[in-house]
Image (cartoon, helix red, strand yellow):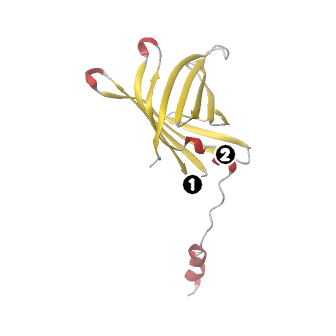
Amino acid sequence: MALPFVLAAPLGAQQVAPPVPAEMRALAFLEGRWEGTGHMGAGERRAEARTTEVVRFRADTGVVVIEGRGVARGPDDQDIVVHQAFGVLWYDRPAGRYRLRTFRRGGESLEPDITVGDHRLAWEFTDPRAGRIRFEIDVRDQVWRERGAYSADGTTWTPFFEMVLQRVGPAE
């Protein structure tokens, strides 16, 4: 009965990890644990928040996982979660482009158009309630600056989201 040993042999062989694709290395600027402040909304509906973003490479650096959470101080000094998001970012070799799948509180999911540049990341999508929505992240000198804006006509953009975070360590 040698069959189990024959089948098990390849499992015991040392496997060499494939090199990290250049497209994924280009996202290394995002990796880590980030903390700071931000706001959502405008006017009376503006909510200031303490925000955390945690960015990790997973699946042998094949994907980047991004988890964000913003907490505001509510009535009676209670913490209220005002921002909670989860995203998976990867490079789709057959399509020759980056892809991003995001998930928000309440189960909403979307796959926006995405652009990756030098320490920059931008994504855009259409929302039936607000029109076009755009987010941009720029990371320089260990500072993550993110802005969000919406446009009903695709020309005039109204800011509604901004956060400034500092890298505070690895993405444990």
Residue for badge 2: 91
Residue 122 appears at what percent x and percent y?
Answer: 62, 31
Tell me if label 2 and label 1 are in contact, CB under 8 Å. Answer: no
Note whether residue 110 is visible: yes
Task: Say what amino acid the circle numbered 1 marks.
Answer: Ala
Residue 36 appears at what percent x and percent y?
Answer: 44, 31
Q: Which residue is drawn at 52% across and 34% down?
A: 143
Task: Say what amino acid the circle numbered 2 marks.
Answer: Tyr
Residue 14 appears at what percent x and percent y?
Answer: 59, 72
Give the image quarter of residue 38.
top left
Residue 44 appears at what percent x and percent y?
Answer: 41, 12
Q: Which residue is drawn at 49% across and 29% down?
A: 164
Answer left or right for 136 relative to 45.
Answer: right
Q: Tell me the number on the disc at residue 50.
A: none
Residue 156 sits above or below residue 55 on the image: above
Residue for badge 1: 59
